Image: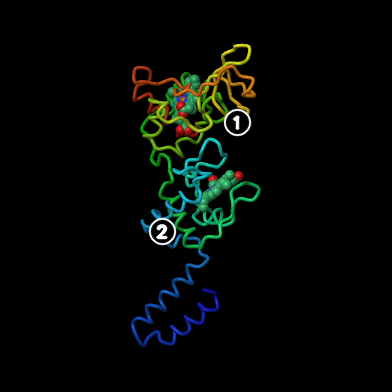
Amino acid sequence: MGFKNKVAISKHALRLAFTDKLSWLLFAWLLGAQWTYGQELNPLEGDPRAARVGGSIFRAQCATCHGADAKGIDSIDAPDLTLVYAGTGTSDESVFDKIRNGVPGSIMPAHTFPDTEIWMLVSYLRSIGVSGISSAVDGNPDLGRTLFSNNCAACHRKGNEGGALGPNLSKITEVRSLEALISSIRNPSFSISRGYKPVSITTSDSQQIQGVIKREDAFSIQIMDTNQFLRAFSKMSLKGLEYEEQSWMPVFSESLLSDTELRNIISFLQSSL
Ligand code: HEC
Ligand code: HEC
């Protein structure tokens, strides 16, 4: 329906507005429809069906790049969309705009779906979005800092310090729940972060190299080895290539790191220390 039509109908509705109840409702609805047009709030917010239908549209239209669970797939460099709302205030409108217009200069395409369907996609992304730890974790960040330097900093950064074999943890408490963080520390191999999949390589001169996969295609592989050097190999030149199931991160059981110590580390990660 074009804009002209809408105006014509609402004038008509206005004339009848107070003559019968149905037209009054129609008028109110049109007024509402015009008002929501172009505003930044999701008109479907709070409607659980919107997120469900949005999920189906997502799996049909977006999963090839973003993965069926929206967490991304290894072979394509498209972001984990469960993180879109993590951290600082992303608005529904900006997510709407990215879906509508795409991201220029990237493979993220523009989409010509009707507005309602895009809002359903926005509702879906909202519903699966992670929001990190919302309240302060009960722990001692000063003690946590020492524990972090001794046990974690060889592989992880916080601020400007630390290694790079594992992910930078400076903002991790904004994008992971407390349960998810505890699980990654107690049981690292349960869910291995994208960009950190463990691999073992045997070179043509029988050198054994272990590391995490940074990039890979049919012909080549780039890794960060466990000494934290970036290295690239042509697959044809390798004697062996093994995708490992176990993360290179050690398992921190309670005998190595008590629950109290774990909370101290998490409260350090949450702090600005
Ligand atoms: C051909 C691959 C491809 C398809 C299909 C695709 N995307 Fe994307 N999308 C990308 C890439 C790549 C980016 C990252 C663009 C950039 O910022 O460089 C992206 C970015 C986004 C962003 C912005 C993320 C952010 O952190 O700001 C949103 C939201 C998004 N996509 C949603 C969708 C939805 C919803 C669909 C389906 C309707 C979809 N995409 C289909 C590849 C794709
Ligand atoms: C020997 C290197 C190494 C050490 C030491 C190490 N990690 Fe890790 N860590 C990794 C690697 C590699 C990954 C990515 C693979 C995975 O998810 O297991 C990782 C993943 C993580 C994740 C998940 C991040 C995400 O994006 O969800 C958390 C949280 C984490 N480590 C915390 C810690 C803490 C806390 C310590 C110290 C108590 C620690 N790590 C010690 C290598 C290490």
Rendered image: mark on residue 3: none
Q: Is residue 180 above or below residue 65?
A: above
Q: What residue would you read off at disc 1? A: 218
Q: Earlier in the sequence, mark 1 or mark 2?
A: 2
Q: Position of residue 125 (x, y in %)?
A: 45, 50
Quadrant of res 187: top left
Quadrant of res 245: top left
Residue at 34%, 17% in the rendered image: 255
Q: Is residue 96 visible?
A: yes
Q: Which residue type carries mark 2?
A: Glu
Q: Secondary structure at mark 2?
A: loop
Q: Which residue type carries mark 1?
A: Ala
Residue neighbourhood size for the residue with mark 2, other residues' Cα within 10 Å, grouped as few (<14), some (14–19), many (≥20): some
CA distance separating discs 1 and 2: 43 Å
Q: Position of residue 166 (x, y in %)?
A: 51, 26
Residue at 63%, 29% in the rendered image: 219
